[in-house]
Image (cartoon, rainbow, N blue to C red):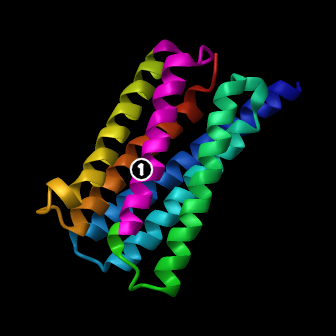
Amino acid sequence: MGKKISEEKLKASNLLFGLAIIILSIVVMILSIINITLIILIVILSVALFVSGLVRIINASSIELIENEVATYKLVTGLLAIILSIIIFCSTITEPHVAIELLILIFAFALILTGIVRFSVGLSTKGYPMKFRVFLVIVGILTIILSIIIFVSPFFLPFFDYIILIFLISISLLINGIAKLILGIIGTK
């Protein structure tokens, strides 16, 4: 019975937080299209990153439902995402003159870690249906690609302005939110 309750909590948290990440990502995408200030966009993204980290920690605490190494990945990346989101949020609020590039690169770093974990979980976790594992691998690859584009853009794609980079971050969070939502729907085998 304890495993059943834990699985239901895990599904509910994945549904709730997946939906929250999707909504926050769409809000940022819309706001970036209508050219809202960068500070507002970064604050919203930091909240989305915080939520994503929180979900990873909650999922890691359901160790009986997932393999131990996956739980460790989720716990470490969840903690890093939360720490990075707090740093981004505080520096944006307290020192808005801090270089926006640095904040965007911190987001990209956090998303690369998320992409690596999604990819690894898709390859190694036997508790998920095969179609979902393939989906996780694709989400991981897309997240890594978008994050690499964000990383290299200041050097190789100077025509990408901050709004485009924030839009790419939002897309990455959106696809990861969708993965979380689907996980909440299907659960584990």
Residue 38 pos. (x, y %)? 33, 76
Query: Quarter-wise, where is residue 144 in the image?
Result: top left
Q: Nearer the viewer, residue 37 or 146?
A: 146
In which quadrant will I find the N terminus? Answer: top right
Counting other residues with Cα less than 10 Å from the Cα at mark 1, is it few (<14), some (14-19), or many (20 or more)?
many
Q: Nearer the viewer, residue 120 or 25?
A: 120
On screen, residue 151 above or below 13: below
- Kind of residue indicated by mark 1: Leu
Q: Nearer the viewer, residue 15 or 109?
A: 109
In which quadrant will I find the C terminus? Answer: top right
Q: Which residues are magenta?
A: 102-130
Q: In percent of the image, x 23 and y 75: which residue is there?
A: 35
Q: In percent of the image, x 59 and y 45: which residue is there?
A: 77
Q: In percent of the image, x 88 and y 28: which residue is there?
A: 2
Instruction: Determine which residue is flagged by label 1.
Output: 173
**74 sits to left or right of 106:** right
**121 sits to left or right of 138:** right
